[in-house]
Image (tube, rainbow, N blue to C red):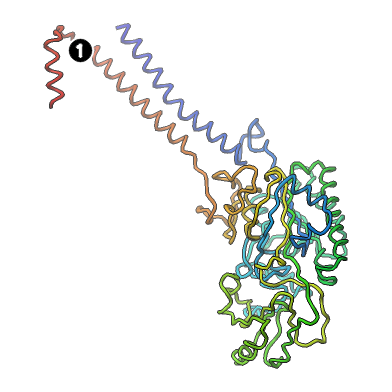
Amino acid sequence: MRSCLLSGAHCYLFCLWALLVPPVCLQHASHHRRKDHGGGGDDGGEGSGRDKPKPKLLLLSFDGFRWDYLNRVPTLNFDALKQEGVKVEVVENTYITKTFPDHYSLVTGLHAESHGIVANEMFDPVLNRSFSMETDSIYDPRWWEEGVPLWVTNQRAGGRSGAAMWPGSDVKIHGVYPTHYLPYNASVPFEARVEKLIQWFAAPDEEAVDFGVLYWEEPDESGHNLGPESSLMDVVIADIDEKLGFLRNELKKAGLYERLNLIVTSDHGMTQLFPEKIIELDQYVSRELYTWVDKSPVVALLPKEGRLEEVYSSLLDANPHLNVYKKEDIPEYFHYRHNDRIMPILLEAEEGWTIVQNRSGTFMLGNHGYNNTLPSMHPVFLARGPAFRQDYVKHSMHSVDLYPLMCHILALRPLPNNGSLANVQDLLSVGPSLAPFARPTSASTSNPPSGVTSSYSYAPAVGSLLGVLMVLGFLVVFVKRVTLKQLPALPMQSREMSQPLLQEDLHL
């Protein structure tokens, strides 16, 4: 009897142990998931999500900085970024290669036809309004709300954003301004913009921004005026490198340099123009037949009612250096067809050529906006920080891939976009986990966007199943042993009698 009780006690202990182990494993695994991915945890206890600082990211654009400008003059600060982080040799930006469309693509991950900022100068037939970067029309949110910039997504998820002059960042998009922003003013020096951003990043934790965007007008302006091939551009490029050095030093002084992820890129490149390479539309078609909407080298024409075929046929074979498209015939690979703001006729000049109505206007020595596959249109790209590898060179990427990359760094779930994290995950110091997005946005759904995987750990489920099996096993053993103890003892049988029975049972 005592043996039976002891055996039963042991079984009870084993059963209790088997029941307790799975919940403990579940709690342990859940704790690690919260710790690893930044989710909620205990109220400041050791290992809680709050002990892990939020990742910080600063995106800097030097407008018109072509990828090969780095080969022109010594650029010590750009070189340092490459050694400390990553460099991408070829970045194919989105069509058309203009300032507003490309900057909005960087922060939405969308092609221009998807985010709606299709040019620097636009006409919307639905709104019956015109948009120009030279007028206050840029502050009308309706132009911007076909896309959702990253600062909006970040703030909807509980983050804080800072913006210094980035196109569109001083517009109330989807009812949201950046947490801190500077209204656009070209006269504000680069250094002042940097100092303000660092002030926002270095604020106390409950006030500090975790995502910032910084824009500088050069070397685009000089590239237009001087031409990218001018030797005078060397001084401009060297000055950009010094400005990058100023940013690096200020980040170091603020104690942010090693904690912050810094991405330095541009919207587009620049190509040299020539006075003899001019296409005059007045030679081929009357300007009374159309409205000139966007400027060279990709000109959008809105034909007067009933005159589309006349305008198109007049220009189709007018000049061998001019591509003429009806909207529906624009090559699909441009991703520049499916939007009401794209005009019925699109004219595209060959690289180095300029489209004008006549020669009375001013002439620029450099320009951009050309086919986005041209090397002259490609921007620079370097990045460094805790999220990135060190001294790593990647051959190519698409500019729309930057958006999912930034979402990953900030632990945000990206909205639907035209980019792919898989295309750029080799830039990361640690590959993407199965669930890098700890802070869901209000616009996110239960199904992750294409190219984004979500995490589910099977360890807790397996542990629970094993625990249940162990409990059942011990219960079976326990019941069997107790039952056997209650049965009357049987007389011992010889081995000779029992062996045939066993063999017979096996044959049944």
| Amino acid at dot 1 | Leu
Residue 109 appears in the rendering: yes
Question: Looking at the rendering, in which quadrant would you find the C terminus?
Answer: top left
Q: How many marks?
A: 1
At 80% from the left edge and 68% from the top edge, which residue is drawn? 228
Residue 135 appears in the rendering: no
Q: Quadrant of residue 414?
A: bottom right
At 84% from the left edge and 47% from the top edge, which residue is drawn? 250
Secondary structure of the residue carrying numbered label 1: loop
Label 1: which residue? 487
Q: Quadrant of residue 230?
A: bottom right
In this orientation, which residue lies closer to the viewer: 123 or 426?
A: 426
Q: Is residue 322 above or below residue 404?
A: below
In this orientation, which residue lies closer to the viewer: 264 or 293?
A: 264
Residue 293 position in % (x across, y down): 70, 81
Q: Is residue 28 above or below residue 261?
A: above
Q: Is residue 276 above or below residue 33?
A: below
Residue 2 position in % (x across, y down): 32, 6
At 54% from the left edge and 52% from the top edge, which residue is drawn? 452
Residue 268 position in % (x across, y down): 72, 65
Residue 378 position in % (x across, y down): 70, 63
Q: Is residue 397 left or right of residue 277?
A: left
Q: Is residue 280 left or right of residue 15?
A: right
Question: Looking at the rendering, in which quadrant would you find the N terminus?
Answer: top left
